[in-house]
Amino acid sequence: MAGNLTRDEARERARLLDVESYVVELDLTTGEERFGSTTVARFGCAEPGASTFIDLHGAVVREVTLNGRALDPASYDADRGRVPLPGLAADNELRVVADCAYSRSGEGLHRFVDPVDQSVYLYTQFETADAHRMFTCFDQPDLKATFELAVTTPLGSGWRVITNERPDVNGIRTGTWRFRPTPRVSTYITALVAGPYHVVEDEYRRPDGSTVPLGVYCRSSLAEHLDADAIIEVTRQGFEYFEKVFDLPYPFSKYDQLFVPEFNAGAMENAGCVTFLEDYVFRSRVTDAAYERRAETILHEMAHMWFGDLVTMRWWDDLWLNESFATYMSVLCQSEATKWTGSWTTFANLMKAWAYRQDQLPSTHPISADIPDIQAVEVNFDGITYAKGASVLKQLVAYVGRDNFLEGVRGYFQRHAWGNTVLADLLDALEETSGRDLASWSKEWLETAGVNTLRPEYEVDAAGNFTRFEVVQGAVAEYPTLRSHRIAIGLYDRTAEGIVRRERVELDIVGGRTEVPELVGVARPDLVLVNDDDLTYAKIRLDPHSQATLVEGIGDIREGLPRALCWSAAWDMTRDAEMATRDYVRLVLSGVRGVTDISVMQTLLRQARTAVHQYADPAWRETGLRLMGDALADLAREAPAGSDFQLGYVQAFAATAVSAEHLDLVRGLLDGSQTLAGLTVDTELRWALLRRLVVTGRAGEAEIDAELARDATAAGERHAAACRAALPTAAAKAAAWAGVISGTLPNAVFRATLGGFVEPDQAELLRPYADAYFAEVGRLWDEWSSDMAQTFAEVAYPFLQIAPETVERTDAYLAERNPPAALARLLSEGRDGVARALRARARDAAAG
C-alpha cells in the first residue's frame, strides 16, 4: 500500500495546512520502469514553525527544496511514503524532484503495452490515496488545491495526453503538453491518460446554446469496436437530466470518457476525465443487460461530478455519500431519461442482492462507517457503501418527498461547492427543505448494521377472507435493531392473463409486529408480497400459501419488479438454508421461461450454478448440473433466433455442460459442426466454449494456443491465462499458483489466472492449496500493493473446500496470527461463506 494515512493524521494536517496549488511536471521519456516527476506545491501553515509531512510513494528522491532551503533527500521515508517538512513558514513553497515508478497493478500511473501493435498506454487510478505514486502531494480529500500539469511524451509517437483540464499547449508535435489549472479539487480525482488513444469528439449542447466538449477514447486496436454514438447518447441524456434536477451546470470545462486497459474497477470519477473498464468496449455481441450496466456506470460517474467532485467528503467515513448518492441518482436517471425504464427492477435484482449478502457477513458495518485509516477504506468499497446506501437513500426520498429531497440537494451543492462536507451537512439541508427531523432516521438507518426480515402472518375464515393480518419484523441477535419501514403490501391473484396485482396497501412498519386492519375482511390472494414496489431495504419471506404459488408459477407473474422480488426472496431463502438447493434450482429451471428481463434471467442462471456448486448436497451436484445442462440446451434451441435470450442461454450452458452429450454440443458449436439458427459464435463466445472443454478435459494446451493465435490481443492473453489455469491437472494448478504468488504478473493477467485457478468443478485439485493459502496470505498482504493483496486474499481463499476444517483453519489463523484488521475482515468473510454453504448443504441433503 502507498502509505497508510490515519484519520487522526489527516485531521491534524487539515487543521494545520491550507493548500493553494500544485504545479506538476512529468517526463514520460525516461524509460520503461520510471518517469520524472517534479512538483511545486504552495500552501499556508496556521502555525509557523510547525512540522508536517507530504506523501510520495516508491520514488527515488533527487531534490527537496522548502522555501529556498535545500533539505536532505535521504530524509525521505520510503517505507511510509513520506517526505518530512520541518520548520514551516506561514506561506510555503515546496519543490520535490523525484523519479517515480510506473505501475502494473492498476494503482498510480499504470503502464500497458498493447500486444497487437506494441503501443504504450498510460492512465492513472488514484482512489483512495494513490496520487502520491505519481507526484508529491498531501494525499487526502479535504486538502483541495488547483493542479497545473505539464507532460513530456515521446516525440513522434502520436501520443495524446488527457487530464482534468483542456491543454493550453497541444504537444502532439513538440512532445510537451501544458494544461490549464483545474478548479480546487481533491488529489484522488486528478488524472492523467496518455498514449496513442483513438478518440471520437462531440459535444453536449444546452438549450441556451452553450456547450460541453465531449470525448470518447479507447486504444487504437479497439477502435473498430467502439460504439461511441451509443455512449454519447447516454452521456447527453445524463447531462440534460442532472443539470435539470440539480439546477446547476456541469462544473468542469469538458467531459472525456476513456476506456483504459487493465483497469481494476468499473470506472473512476476523475473530474472531467472519467476512466472506465475496457471491457465496456464490447468486442463481441453481448446482451442488452451489458448495455444497461454500462449506461448505469456512465451515469453513476457523471453524478459524481456534482456529488463527490464539486462537493467532496471530508474523510473516507462518508465514502457512502459519494457512492450511494451516485448509485441512486444513476438508476433514477436511467429509469426516467433513457430507454432502460425498468432499471429499478435491475437494481432490486442485482444491487440489493449484493447489499443483502454483504449485510449478513460478520464484517457488516453501518452505512456511515468508522474508517480509522486508508487500509480500512480499501476494503469498504462494498455492498453496504454502494447498494445498501442507495437503497436507504431511496427510502429517504420517499420519507422527505422527492421535491424536498432534490431541493435540499440543490441547496447542499450551492452551499458547499468546491468544499468538503460530512453527513450532517447533507442532513441539515434536507431537514431545511422537508421540515423533518432526520436525527432518528440517521441513527436507525445510517448508524446501525444488519438487515431486517419482514414476513406476513395472517389467519383466514372459512370463506378465505383475512380475519387477522400482521407484518412481523425480525433481526439477528448480533444486530437487533428493528427499524421503521415504509412498505407496500401487494395482493396478487391467478388470472387468465397470469398472476396480477389485485390490491395494494401502503403503510408504515414499526417494531416487531404491525397490524394491517385495512386487509381484515379482504379475500386472501394467491400471493402476498410484502415490500411490493421495493420501497424499503429488508429481506422478505413468503407465507406457505404464497410460497406454493411461487413454486408452481413464478414465471406467470406479469410485472418484472414483483417477479424479481419473488426471485430475490427464493435466492435469499436458499442462502439461509430455508429452501433446499435442489428446489431452488428446479424453481429457476421451471420459471426462467417466464422471465422477460434479460438481466434478471442471466442473474438467475448464475445464481443457480453457484447454488449447485456451493449449496447443493455433493451427492446431488452431478444431477443438478445435468438438469441445468439439459434445460439450458433446450432453452437455447427454443429461444428466438439471434435473440438476447438465445445468447444468454448458450453462455449459461457453456459454463454448466457436464455430460458427454452436453460437451459434444459445446465442441460442435466451437468447431462449427453444430449450429443454432441466428447464433454467431464470435470471439468471446469461442473463449467461453473452449474454456468449458478445457475444464472438462476435452481440450488442452494446443487448443488454447490455437485460439490465442486467432485472438492475439490483450483480452486473448487474459482468456488464455485463465484457460491454462483451469486445465484439470495437478501440474497446471501448480504452475498457476506459482505465477499468482510470484508477484510478477500484470494485474489483469493475475486476476484472470486466479479466476481460472479457482474453477468450481475442480475443488479436489485445489485441496492442497488451502494450507498454501494460509502460508502465503500474510506475507503477500505485507509485501504487495493494496489492490493485488486484497484480490489474492479474497479470490484465493479456499472457498471451494466446503468442510468444517476450512472454518477451523481460518479461526486458528485469526487467533494465532492476529492479522491486520482489513485482512482479518476478508478472512472472516471467506469463512462465513464456507459456514453458510455447510448449512445449505445440510438442508439440501435433508430434502433428498
Image: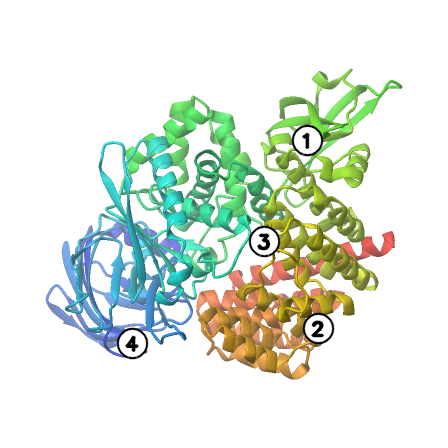
Residue 89 visible in the picture? no
Q: Nearer the viewer, mark 2 or mark 4?
A: 2
Number of the label disc, if any, that sits on residue 530: 1
As measured in the structure, the alpha-carbon distance from the residue carrying label 1 to the one carrying label 2 is: 44 Å
Mark 2 belongs to which amino acid? Thr
Mark 2 Cα-neighbour bin, 10 Å: few <14, some 14–19, many ≥20: some
Residue 844: % across, % down: 82, 54
Relative vertical location of residue 274 with respect to residue 782 in this rendering, above or below: above
**Which comes sooner in the sequence, label 4 or label 1?**
4
Report the amino acid beneath label 4.
Answer: Arg
Looking at the image, which residue sits at the far right? 462
Residue 469: image quadrant is: top right
Kindly identify which numbered label has been placed on residue 34. Answer: 4
Q: CA distance from mark 2 to mark 4?
A: 43 Å
Quick check: 198 left or right of 670? left
Q: Circle 3 sits in a helix, a strand or a loop, which is it?
A: loop
What residue sits right under mark 2 in the picture?
Answer: 696
Q: Residues within 10 Å of mark 3 (few under 14, many from 20)?
A: some
How far across and how far down the image is residue 436, in percent?
46, 23
Q: Nearer the viewer, residue 393 or 220?
A: 220
Would residue 530 appear left or right of 408 to someone viewing this image?
Answer: right
